[in-house]
Amino acid sequence: MLANTNHKQLAQKIFEATSCAIMVTNSSGNIVAINQAFTNVTGYSRDEIIGKNPRIFQSGKQSREFYKNLWINLLEKGSWQGEFWNRRKNGEIYLQWANISAIEDEKNIHYVAIFSDITTVKSEENKLRKMAYYDPLTKLPNRLLLEERLNHALAISARHENLVAVLFLDLDNFKPINDCLGHDVGDKFLQEVAKKIKHCVRKNDTVARLGGDEFVVILEDVKEVHNCETVANKIIMAVSNIAIADTSLRGGVSIGISIAPIDGCDCENLLTKADSAMYKAKRSGKNNYMIYQRDKTKRIRHLGFQKPERRNNLL
């Protein structure tokens, strides 16, 4: 009996000493025990929370389907772990990582949730991810994320036999704006260009900034070659006249287009060919677009596409 009492005392000390929050519920789902770390995280004292149902912590960010799947796993496998949002006593929403287990004895079943607040950790992770994958000025994906998304789009395209288009954009009149009006105006101009381009494409398409005044657009699930031309014309029109601080700035953009699988199926090759087509557009008078295809008639007919109307805009 003495040994059993000592074990219980030791277990209670461990229960209270751990830095992880612990909550125990009975088979009806009502809370029967918590530790001090639970109070530290949630703000609820033992007297306030014993006998209550954990649903009072729900943040509203998780769907019913989420909780349904959680309980299915808990009942079938005896445990569940993952992250979700909960609400503290003061109303603040926080992100927690939880491990929930079903504990059975001869008479009853209890559920033990061990969790910790990971809001700050997740926030830091998101900041680091933004630094690694996004352009700080325009908040657009940078080259690293662009390549990841392009490779992903190419993989999906290969399975579904759809086209992927890469549009390489270079602003035509950015240097005079930057030199004459200053870098602050130049930065605002680039931010406005980014917004204009995003409004010209679908939500599932990608707009990225490579640096300077160079942007790249990935168009996924393209049905016909002329769809790329439609987008290119929309972008040219959108960028042609931008107002900053009540000042109308005449911009321009040269666009080069490559298309997978017509022009290749790897990221670097498509970017290189789109870049080459963009320089051809600049040499042809700027503020227009070119599609990279050396043998357009053969390739387009072979893939069952119609020739684009603007034949002079093909390499």
Image (cartoon, rainbow, N blue to C red):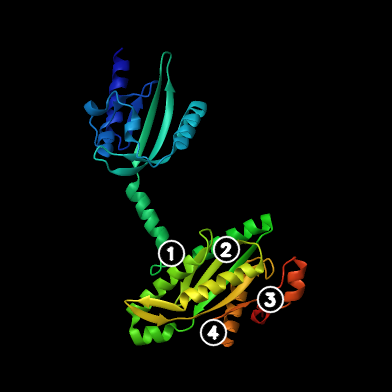
Q: Residue at x 69, y 69 (%)?
A: 262
Of the residues shown, which amino acid type is indicated by label 1?
A: Tyr
Q: Are marks 1 and 2 in contact (CB under 8 Å)?
A: no
Q: Position of residue 168 (x, y in %)?
A: 55, 74
Quarter containing the C terminus: bottom right
Of the residues shown, which amino acid type is indicated by label 2?
A: Leu
Q: Which label sits in the foreground, 4 or 1?
A: 4
Rounded to the nearest angstrom, the CA distance separating label 2 from label 4 is: 26 Å
Q: Which label sits in the foreground, 3 or 2?
A: 3
Q: Which label sits in the foreground, 3 or 4?
A: 4
Q: Is residue 123 left or right of residue 231?
A: left
Would you name the residue on which mark 2 appears?
150
Q: Which mark is residue 134?
A: 1
Q: Secondary structure at mark 3?
A: loop
Q: Position of residue 283 (x, y in %)?
A: 58, 87
Of the residues shown, which amino acid type is indicated by label 4?
A: Lys
Of the residues shown, which amino acid type is indicated by label 3?
A: Gln
Q: Position of residue 21 (x, y in %)?
A: 31, 35
2 or 4: tag closer to the N-terminus: 2
Would you name the residue on which mark 3 appears?
293
Q: Which label sits in the foreground, 1 or 3?
A: 3
3 or 4: tag closer to the N-terminus: 4
Would you name the residue on which mark 4 appears?
286
Crowding at label 4, few (<14), some or many (≥20) Cα neighbours within 10 Å?
some
